[in-house]
Image: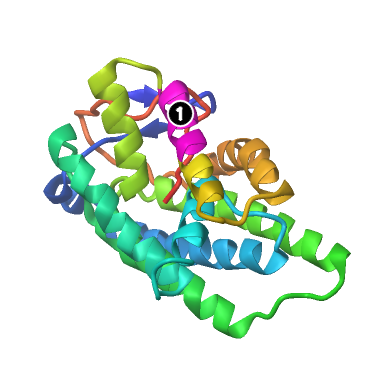
Amino acid sequence: MALLTPTRITLTDLGPVAQLRAGRLGRRLSQLTVGLVLYGVSLALMVRGAFGLAPWDVLHSGLIGFVPVTLGQMVVLMSFVVLLFWIPLRETPGVGTVANAFLVGFSADATMALVGAPDEVWLRLVTTTVGVLLCGLATAMYIGAQLGRGPRDGLMTGLARRTGWSLRLVRTLLEAGVVLLGVILGGAIGMGTVLFAVGIGPVTQALLPFFVVELPLPRLLDGPSEGGYVSQN
């Protein structure tokens, strides 16, 4: 069954072998790689802006206070922890799932090694805003490559399928839960967290039509619905 977003974009939900056989692989792999690297860059910019992080990154930033790893390394570690929950949910990893687990965290660490934190408040605000906008672009590129969900996306869609709840409700509950846990652990929450929550959906939805690589497939499976769906890497 085809998934049509409010912008009339058709997305597919395929297994890893079908993803590789679906065509336009060079374009899709390149777009996936660039999108995931930019996702890590956007995470680093929000860190440097110091106005608060995206929901899952609030948790990541809280956890590194107790585990001797960098933020990017925690993103990678948590990706594989989340993938363990895919097993009972019977979610199937794809090419993008594995790439996501590694590239976002490594890219974030590399960017933070190169980019320092601005001193002026207005520059920090600009850095945070650019981080959110860049994350929307990166998400559109990553989803548009049609090479599989990220670990946290699969957890969301798997829970929605198993419970029968809407994606919007499952996403809200998951993100509220990880933010709450992150805050308890001392994670970085603030205005940037609110900006991300409000802005990432519209930005991604606006840019997605420019990056979806249409696949010449006769069979399209169920995918994420409700126009508010955006990737959380």
The quadrant where residue 127 appears = bottom right
Residue at 56% x, 56% y: name it.
186
Q: Is residue 230 on the magenta stretch? A: no
Q: Say which residue appears at 16% left-offset and 49% top-offset.
A: 16
Most extreme residue toward the bottom, as rendered?
Answer: 114
Under circle 1, the secondary element is helix
Which residue is situated farthest in the top direction here?
A: 164
Q: Residue 40's spot in the image, x, y percent?
A: 50, 65
Q: Which residues are magenta?
A: 167-177
Q: Please state the total of marks drawn on the protein image.
A: 1
The amino acid marked with disc number 1 is Leu
The answer to whether residue 179 shows anywhere in this view is yes
The colour scheme used to paint the residues is rainbow
Say if residue 26 shows up in the picture.
Answer: no
Q: Residues within 10 Å of mark 1 (few under 14, many from 20)?
A: few
Q: Is residue 154 above or below residue 47?
A: above
| 146 with respect to 168 (left or right) | left
Magenta span dominant secondary structure: helix
Q: Is residue 92 left or right of residue 113?
A: left
Query: Picture coordinates of residue 201 (x, y %)?
Result: 58, 36
From the image, which quarter does the N terminus lie in? Answer: top left
Which residue is labeled 1 in the image? 173
On screen, residue 228 above or below 32: above
Coordinates of residue 139 in the picture (x, y in percent): 49, 49
Please tell me in which quadrant of the rendered image residue 47 appears. bottom right
Q: Is residue 137 left or right of residue 3?
A: right
Give the image location of residue 216, x and y in percent. 26, 39
Name the residue: 54% across, 28% down.
7
As drawn, is 170 to the left or to the right of 16? right
